[in-house]
Image (cartoon, rainbow, N blue to C red):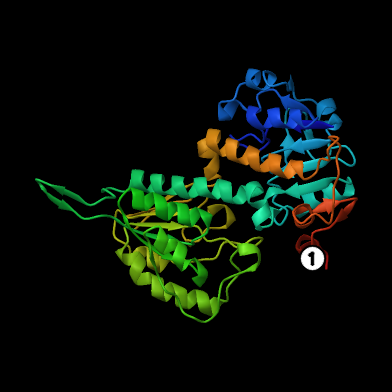
Amino acid sequence: MIVLVANEAATGETRVSATPETVKRMISSGLEVRIESGAGNAAFLDDTEYTDVGATVESASIAGRQAADVLLKVGPLGELAELGRSEIELLKEGAVVIGFLDPFLRPDDVRALAAGSITALPMEFIPRVTRAQSMDALSSQASIAGYRAVLLAAHRLPRYFPLLMTAAGTIRPAKVVVMGAGVAGLQAVATARRLGALVEVSDIRPAVKEQVESLGGRFIDLPEMETGDGTGGYAKEMGEEFLRRQREILTEHVAAANVVITTAAVPGKPAPRLLSADMVHRMKPGSVIVDLAAERGGNCELTRADEEVIENGVTILGPTNVAASMSRDASALYARNVLELLKELVDDEGALQVDLENDVVGPTLVTHGGKVVHQQVAAQLEEATD
């Protein structure tokens, strides 16, 4: 079985879907691994590091893509300018593609994958069950984003994070508010606390309060109107009345903060609006907002993706694909996630075996056997055609 580690079509994507470490393990499992030349360059992994562990390095070509039984990507799928073709149309019938495929926002990709009888496994659909923790790429990459968000804020903030007692006087610690206590939010809490900041955390899921406090943060209690706990450990979409009450409670905390980091996201939905323009206007000049939900429209009303906005003296950063800014470690973690999922698809003989009853593979599949098999994605496509 031929596994192809592909170059990325997306501009600015520095990660790679396999490292020499994971390639070596694939080959030991009986797989033939081919690497498109330069695939690891942006992650500081040279072609020779792959050949040293037994992989074949080849130039990107139409024939190379069409020969692959499994295509490994960071994603999403796109147009290959150098080949003049789309990645999807180059996949052979029955091939498997693994990566961040963004199926909710790319319905045309889903239809094309189904039409081509491609088995597509988006890494963002890995179920949050104990057995699948080693495959949870959303978590591994979100942890990096939370860490980097704090460093971005510290770099732009015109003051220290920690308490400092000097001969010239005392510097009070910075106040940080983190919105969303998922993986990114918790890593942001831990990093801000390591830097000495005072940290408050808001989340619609009361169950995360203990985790927040264990990291040294203070949990901001929200209106007990409904719980935000969704399925699979994710947050659910909340009603407008809850969000209004939430903003009322958070306004005074945000106004007193030096840094606000927003991380709130709901799978398959636009990012919830947590910070209104009025809330931003109440913040102190020199404060910094880092909106990690910028790619999905932003948690802040004033965020613009991949731009810096200065509003009333407040700096608003909306970075997207933050994990790519730490390409080496991000690739190492992501590649291990991909490897663990790939192992679920390969039998002891090194042959492909897609088991729809597998408790990880089944929920992750979007297309298989010429059909859209993921219920939520299929329902969305149906609504779009009605």
Question: Residue at coordinates 68% horizontally, 46% vertically from top-left?
Answer: 100
Q: Mark 1 sits on what residue? A: 379
Q: Which image quarter: residue 351?
A: top right
Q: Which image quarter: residue 63?
A: top right
Quadrant where the N terminus is found in the figure = top right
Question: Residue at coordinates 69% horizontally, 19% vertically from top-left?
Answer: 51
> Is residue 275 in sight in this rendering?
no
Q: Is residue 249 left or right of residue 47?
A: left
Q: Secondary structure at mark 1?
A: helix
**The one of 88 and 336 positioned closer to us in this rendering:** 336
Question: Residue at coordinates 83% horizontally, 38% vertically from top-left?
Answer: 348
Quadrant where the C terminus is found in the figure = bottom right
Kind of residue sitting beneath label 1: Ala
The residue lying furthest to the left in this view is: 167
> Is residue 300 in sight in this rendering?
yes
The residue lying furthest to the bottom in this view is: 225
Image spot of residue 163 (x, y percent): 23, 52
Location of residue 108 with respect to 81 vertically, above or below: below
Image spot of residue 368 (x, y percent): 86, 51
Location of residue 52 with respect to 67 vertically, above or below: above
Question: Residue at coordinates 57% horizontally, 47% vertically from top-left?
Answer: 140
Q: Is residue 159 left or right of residue 348?
A: left
Image spot of residue 22 (x, y percent): 67, 32
**The one of 25 and 225 positioned closer to us in this rendering:** 25
- Callout 1 crowding tier (Cα within 10 Å): few <14, some 14–19, many ≥20: few
Location of residue 386 with respect to 344 vertically, above or below: below
Give the number of callouts. Answer: 1
Q: Is residue 167 left or right of residue 83?
A: left
Image spot of residue 362 (x, y percent): 79, 56
Q: Is residue 104 left or right of residue 262?
A: right
